[in-house]
């Protein structure tokens, strides 16, 4: 086992959960309410950064804060139920517990909505930290002693590196293996289904 307690952090969207159906549904309702023309397929093709960055593609700058707040209000009623767990998500959490470790989710998503997703899907990390993106994720990762951080976006790699954690990239989101490696990922996996075996080997190295 590793010399310090194993704490593994995960990104949420497109790492632990496939939120594309839910986010697309929420944006459809949001667009209908606001009268904005929003391409939901384009939105879900680039998940990862904070919501405000996406809203800024569709609304003037002086409306972004208010529109983001309204979208977050709409979100629970439309985005939670359609969202699925990614293959290997629950098994990865269980594998970490079997190794005596703990888990945390560190996401740019609004924290209350992140918790709704996890509760609905029966994914139970020990800690959830929301509203953190890229290098900001290192704040929570360091606070809780994360030794590994798993994510699908180059922003997740940057967060892991800023926290001096092992960066594990998964190619289930918008960034491919080359992009993740170029950003500095230590390990790149096709999906979370490969994570339990990697974790066992990582823990055994001590």
Image: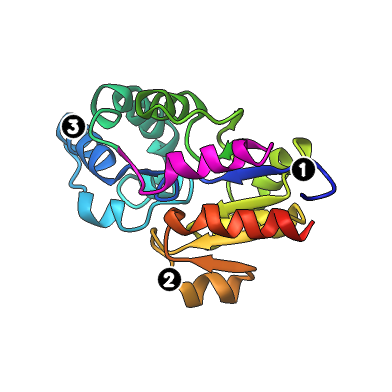
Mark identifier at residue 29: 3
Q: Which x, y percent locates residue 109?
A: 47, 37
From which residue to which does the magenta span run? 84-103
Residue of label 2: 176
44 and 97: which is toward the camera: 97
Question: Is label 1 in a helix, a strand or a loop?
Answer: helix
Mark toward the viewer: 3 or 2: 2
In the picture, the quarter occupied by the C terminus is bottom right
Q: Is residue 157 in sight in this rendering?
A: no
Measured in 3D between alpha carbons, the distance from the residue under mark 3 to the one under mark 1, in whole angstroms, is: 38 Å
Q: Earlier in the sequence, mark 2 or mark 1?
A: 1
Q: Is residue 168 in sight in this rendering?
A: yes
Within 10 Å of disc 1 (Cα), the crowding (few <14, some 14-19, many 20+) is some
- Residue 21 vs 76, above or below: the answer is below
Is residue 25 part of the magenta span, yes or no? no
Q: Which x, y percent locates residue 81?
A: 25, 28
């Amino acid at each position: 086992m590793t010399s310090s307690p194993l704490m593994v952090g995960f990104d949420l969207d497109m790492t632990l959960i496939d939120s594309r159906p839910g986010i697309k549904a929420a944006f459809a309702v949001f667009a209908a309410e606001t009268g904005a023309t929003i391409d939901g397929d384009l939105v879900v093709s680039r998940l990862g950064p904070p919501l405000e960055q996406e809203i800024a593609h569709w609304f003037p700058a002086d409306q972004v804060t208010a529109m983001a707040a309204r979208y977050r209000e709409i979100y629970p009623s439309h985005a939670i139920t359609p969202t699925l767990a990614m293959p290997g998500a629950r098994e990865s959490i269980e594998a970490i517990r079997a190794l005596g470790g703990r888990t945390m989710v560190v996401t740019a998503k609004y924290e209350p909505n992140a918790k709704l997703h996890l509760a609905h899907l029966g994914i139970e990390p020990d800690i959830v930290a929301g509203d953190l993106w890229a290098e900001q994720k290192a704040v929570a990762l360091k606070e809780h002693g994360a030794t590994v951080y798993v994510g699908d976006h180059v922003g997740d790699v940057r967060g892991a590196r800023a926290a001096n954690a092992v960066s594990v990239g998964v190619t289930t989101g918008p960034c491919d293996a080359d992009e993740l490696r170029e950003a500095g990922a230590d390990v790149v996996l096709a999906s979370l289904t490969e994570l339990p075996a990697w974790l066992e080997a990582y823990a055994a190295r001590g």
